Image: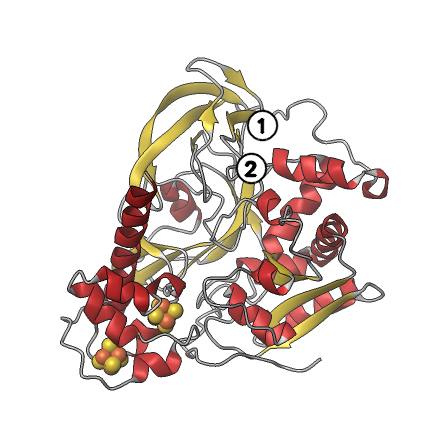
């Protein structure tokens, strides 16, 4: 075992001490949940229930619409009160199903039975993963079954589990690896079997010695290697993880499958285990609730659809100097001010910062210092891309490969001129996508 890494990246303070040693607590059953039909990349699910319907925990309430989509399930038993647009962590309001709990928390029949995984065929396993609505739990929320169905001309040789959790503050994956290592390793073996792969890896940054120890113990005697990685942001980004573990470079515009690799998050492997072993759909997840703006930071197991307010209350509420609330970590998370926003499948954390921790400085012109290029893990030229994006010169931004930007925020982090680089790249990317769609139609 040796610590490995990749070129570029930054070293922000990891700030994980607030919750690193906090065991996962189960949040009390909420009185109601609001479950968005879009919680994944791809087409939103389509509502399968009507207002007034009685539903059980684990029941499908939204069916996947197309291959790149995922079903959504009720996270409690109760009555459908409303189907309407509700606040969503990604920003704009989205269609969601509001369910009022009946207090019984009753499962749909048959979901709690234990199964012998060895006896299941690969197709049966794939069906279970698809039906469980599993998506990438690291935050990207890409439907897992899609990654498990690569085109025939792409031979997958390796599955890598991402346990890097390189975003500062977040410890949800760390605690899961400490507390559920055996299930995660079993989930990885299921993924390997589905893809016909004989070698698996788990990449963990070396600031998580407890995770490394528990995962190595669980992986002993299996064809899975647990790899210790240098602490460097964004170590958990797929392409950087592959470079660090396999020393392979995913080509610009390419996907991990182009170099024979599938990457999944450790939480996703755990969800796969739960789905295949017990038939349980993805109705809850571990979320780190942290930051100096919160009274009692915790790692919580939360039902999908629980309101942020309930999660914050379970952590003692805000400190007086609360300044900003972010879904996810400080580097890639999205700020929000509406406490009705529900926890979704991709909510890895809620970060609450104090007012005095927020640095609001006006953006200045680029001084061509070159710091952004030196830290960009995608070998891009953020300075030029920023200038083109700002001037609506999207063709030029595209020529400089803005579409390859993984929005990690390293460039913004080091920029002495406080240029809003990631915002500019998101803007340029959305304009380029719009233009491409127009050209197709
Ligand atoms: S770090 Fe900022 S100021 Fe320096 S070159 Fe990049 S965009 Fe310009
Ligand atoms: S240009 Fe994109 S990939 Fe490169 S550092 Fe900036 S945000 Fe990250």
> Gap between marks 2 and 1, in whole Å?
8 Å
Q: Is residue 41 left or right of residue 73?
A: left
The residue under the point 74% across, 69% down is 225
Expressed as whole percent of the image width and height from the top left, the position of residue 67 reads: 54, 36
Residue on which disc 1 sits: 57
Image quarter in which the N terminus is found: bottom right
Report whether residue 128 is seen: yes
The residue under the point 62% across, 81% down is 3
The residue under the point 64% across, 76% down is 228
Depth check: 134 or 390 in front? 390
Mark 1 element type: loop
**10 Å crowding of disc 2: few (<14), some (14-19), many (20+):** many
**10 Å crowding of disc 1: few (<14), some (14-19), many (20+):** many
Mark 2 element type: loop
Q: Quadrant of residue 397?
A: bottom left
The residue under the point 37% across, 22% down is 83
Q: Quadrant of residue 367?
A: bottom left
């Amino acid at each position: 075992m040796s610590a490995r890494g990749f070129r570029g990246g930054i070293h922000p303070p990891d700030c994980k001490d607030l919750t690193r040693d906090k065991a996962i607590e189960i949040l009390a059953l909420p009185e109601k949940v609001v479950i968005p039909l879009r919680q994944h990349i791809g087409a939103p699910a389509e509502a399968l229930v009507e207002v007034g319907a009685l539903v059980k925990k684990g029941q499908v309430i939204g069916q996947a619409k197309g291959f790149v989509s995922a079903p959504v399930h009720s996270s409690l038993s109760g009555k459908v009160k409303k189907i309407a647009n509700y606040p969503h962590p990604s920003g704009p309001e989205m269609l969601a199903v509001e369910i009022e709990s009946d207090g019984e928390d009753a499962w749909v029949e048959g979901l709690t039975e234990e199964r012998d995984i060895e006896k299941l065929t690969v197709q049966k396993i794939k069906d279970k993963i698809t039906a469980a609505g599993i998506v990438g739990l690291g935050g990207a929320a890409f439907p897992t079954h899609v990654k498990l169905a690569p085109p025939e001309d792409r031979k997958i040789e390796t599955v890598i589990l991402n346990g890097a959790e390189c975003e500062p503050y977040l410890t949800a994956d760390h605690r899961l690896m400490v507390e559920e290592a055996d299930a995660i390793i079993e989930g990885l073996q299921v993924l390997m079997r589905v893809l016909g792969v004989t070698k698996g890896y788990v990449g963990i940054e070396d600031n998580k010695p407890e995770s490394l120890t528990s995962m190595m113990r669980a992986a002993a005697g299996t064809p899975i290697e647990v790899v210790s990685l240098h602490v460097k942001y964004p170590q958990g980004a797929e392409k950087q993880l592959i470079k660090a573990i396999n020393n392979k470079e995913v080509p610009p515009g390419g996907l991990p499958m182009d170099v024979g690799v599938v990457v999944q998050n450790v939480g996703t492997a755990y969800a796969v285990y739960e789905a295949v072993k017990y038939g349980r759909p993805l109705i809850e997840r571990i979320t780190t609730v942290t930051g100096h703006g919160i009274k009692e930071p915790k790692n919580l197991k939360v039902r999908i659809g629980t309101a942020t307010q309930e999660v914050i209350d379970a952590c003692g509420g805000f400190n007086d100097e609360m300044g900003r609330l972010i879904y996810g970590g400080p580097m890639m998370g999205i700020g929000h001010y509406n406490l009705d926003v529900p926890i979704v499948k991709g909510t890895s954390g809620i970060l609450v910062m104090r007012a005095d921790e927020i640095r609001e400085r006006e953006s200045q012109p680029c001084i061509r210092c070159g710091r952004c290029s030196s830290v960009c893990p995608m070998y891009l030229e953020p300075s030029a891309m920023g200038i083109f994006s700002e001037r609506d010169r999207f063709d030029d931004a595209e020529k400089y490969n803005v579409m390859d930007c993984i929005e990690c925020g390293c460039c913004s982090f080091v920029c002495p001129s406080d240029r809003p680089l990631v915002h500019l790249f998101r803007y340029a990317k959305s304009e380029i996508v719009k233009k491409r769609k127009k050209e197709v139609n």
